[in-house]
Image (cartoon, helix red, strand yellow):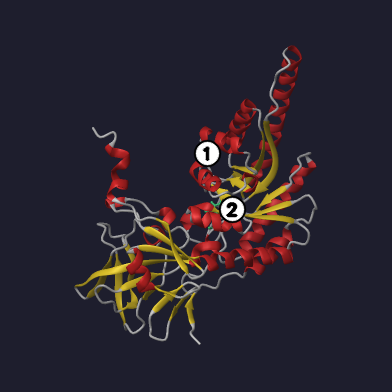
Amino acid sequence: MLQEYREGLLYDEEGRLCFGESKFLVEDLALEFGTPLYVYSASLIQGALREFYGALKSQAGGRSFLICYSVKANSNLSILRLIQKEGAGADIVSAGELHRCRKAGIDPQKIVFSGVGKSPEELEYGLKEGILLFSVESADELFLLDKLARRHGIQARVSLRINPDLTASTHPYISTGGRKDKFGIPSEEILDISLRFREKCQEKDREKSQKKSQDSKGDTGGVEICGLGFHIGSQILDTSSFEQAATILCELRSSLQKSGFSIRYLDVGGGIGIRYKDEKTPAIKDYLTCLFRKLPQDADLNLLFEPGRFIIGNAGILITKILLSKNNRGNKIYVCDAAMNDLMRPALYQSYHEILAHRKERGKCNSSLVGPICESGDFFANERLLPSFEQGDYAAICSCGAYGFSMSSNYNSRLRLAEVLIQGNKAKLIRQRERYEDLLSLEESCMF
Ligand SMILES: Cc1ncc(COP(=O)(O)O)c(C=O)c1O
């Protein structure tokens, strides 16, 4: 019986690295689709979603819930379609992501629009699509959204994102609930802002009804505050942070309810950590136990979950070819054809990704795996035990389904790479490798 080495990855009897439910050889994928190449496993994505849904069903105790997949983790249309077919909705942070979700057939009534700075055009797009909720992060945004909704005669629902003043133990760049972080509204200001907003709305409604009696038109639009939410960061391994945030959320809900607001949506964000190296990750049922200990059990309450990394992080690999090796003053360096523009995480967060050779028999040596870009941050592994690669070998960089391709760029005028989805016994191209024409198309037509 072959032992799975990591999620979806194993070496077959002949020592060849395979990926996906039908055990595609990494070498074959590289030869067929070229490198560098992202490859995802549909069954791993579905498995993570079903695990989440299964745990929710058994633990929610009558509360309604919806998983809104965090699109920023990986926004490929085929991935979104796969997720939509599993019944999930989406958590989006831009008009571009909304556009993708609608193309992928995601019901707008399952879409939450998050983000600390949405433009008026983005808010209007969300209003016109009739999305489920706007997760609002400031008083300015709340008043602007209300103005736009009134102008268009649209009734919109708002969930206020709280900043609970809570620093989750994760990389500082992905901790988002701390006192001075730019995200959310300080929890101590939520009630005041909500009351001030309601007062202003009542004023506007009075003016409107006076005007209406003179001229029978008048709009019906506006915003209702009916939700509260948090997202305290990403790659969180300690579930107690979620529990603390949920406590604050529920206290705030009670005080808003006492002041006459009907808070029917509680959004607990995403952030569940996954295994990159040897981290002890929280089981989904333990994560939910922590939350459900705190969350009320009211019949009219809808709970929203926004996982991204948990759904797709371990379902994707980046295959790259070893271009050459060199030895700089005793430091063995492998240069591969992927670079930081293809996978930013090591450069941005010093993140760890396991690296496997396409052949098991390669020994190990202390070395670095780097890309060809002229930046010292362009590395995938720095001076650690790696396979002893030979020129032309393929390496699989593990656990880069989330925040991999979605953060990629054309830096150094490198063509953005292709993406492949393994589904059953098929490996299907889901994004073409860019061509030189794609690189220039938006400039050539308006070249000086
Ligand atoms: C508002 C919001 N929700 C959900 C997520 C998804 O987080 P994760 O991928 O860690 O689950 C993010 C990511 O930063 C986010 O900003």
Question: Where residue 223 appears, x then y in whole percent?
Answer: 67, 34
Give the residue type at disc 1: Lys
User: Dot 1, crowdedness within 10 Å: few (<14), some or many (≥20)?
Assistant: some
Q: Which residue is mark 2?
A: 231
From this view, report whether residue 221 is shown above or below residue 118.
Answer: above
Q: Which mark is residue 118?
A: 1
Q: CA distance from mark 1 to mark 2?
A: 17 Å
> What amino acid is labelled 2 in the image?
His
Identify the residue shown where x is 65% and y is 27%.
150
Q: Secondary structure at mark 1?
A: loop
Q: Quadrant of the C terminus?
A: top left
- The percent coordinates of residue 131 (x first, y second) are 62, 42
Residue 16's place in the image compared with 421, above or below, is: below
Above-or-below relation of 279 to 419: below
Quarter of the rendering containing residue 365: bottom left
Residue 73 appears in the figure:
no
Quick one: 186 or 45, which is closer to the camera? 45
Mark before the other along the chain sequence, 1 or 2? 1
Question: Label 1 CB, ligand 1: below 8 Å?
Answer: no
427 to the left or right of 202: left
